[in-house]
Amino acid sequence: MRKYPFFPLLLLIAPLVAGAADAHHEMAGMSGSKDQGTLSAASKAYLDSMKDMHGDMSAGVKAADPDVAFAQGMIPHHQGAINMAEVELKYGKDPAMRKMAENVISAQKAEIATMQQWLAEHGQKK
C-alpha cells in the first residue's frame, strides 16, 4: 500500500489556507456566493464543510484550559476531515483517494470519541 506522509500535514494546513482565503473575501466585502456559481458540486461541498468547521473550531479553542481548548478545537477539525472525506466518497473516482477517505473517516471518528470521552471525564462539554 502506498503511504501518503504529507496527508496529515495537509489536514493541518488546509484550514489555515482556507481561513486566509475567507478573510481575504470578507475584507473585500464579498460573501463568496458569487464565486461559487462556477464551482463544481464537489468544490461547493468541500467549501461548505470547511466553513462550518472553521466557526466551530474557533469557538472550541477559546477555553481557558489549553487541554480543553485543544480537544474542543480538534473535534470540529476532525469532523471537518470526516465531512471532506464523505465528499470524496460521493464525488471522487480514484480508488486510492477513496480508500484514503475511508481511512480518514475511521481514524477521525475514533479520535473524536477519545477526545469526547476525555472531555466528559474532565467535566467539560463535548
Image (cartoon, helix red, strand yellow):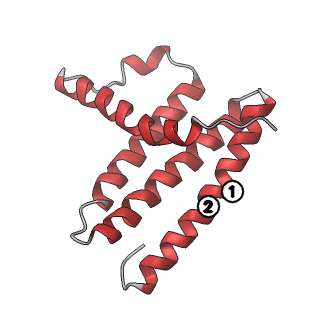
Quadrant housing the N terminus:
top right
Q: Residue 65: percent from the left, percent from the top?
A: 26, 72
Where is residue 62 shown, x and y percent of the image?
A: 24, 62
Q: Element type at marker 2?
A: helix
Disc 2 and disc 1 in contact, CB within 8 angstroms: yes
Q: Tell me the amino acid under the disc marked 1.
A: Ser
Task: Estimate the spatial distance between the alpha carbons at disc 2 and disc 1, rounded to whole Å.
Answer: 5 Å
Q: Residues within 10 Å of mark 1 (few under 14, many from 20)?
A: few
The quadrant holding residue 34 is top left
Amino acid type for the residue under numbered disc 2:
Lys
Q: Which label was assigned to residue 109? A: 2
Q: Residue placed at 77% from the left, 33% from the top?
A: 96
Give the vertical position of 44 relative to 126 (above or below).
Answer: above
Q: Look at 59% across and 28% down and name the residue there.
A: 42
Judge by depth and name the residue closer to the eye, 53 or 77: 77
Q: Position of residue 118 (x, y in %)?
A: 47, 78
Q: Which residue is mark 1?
A: 106
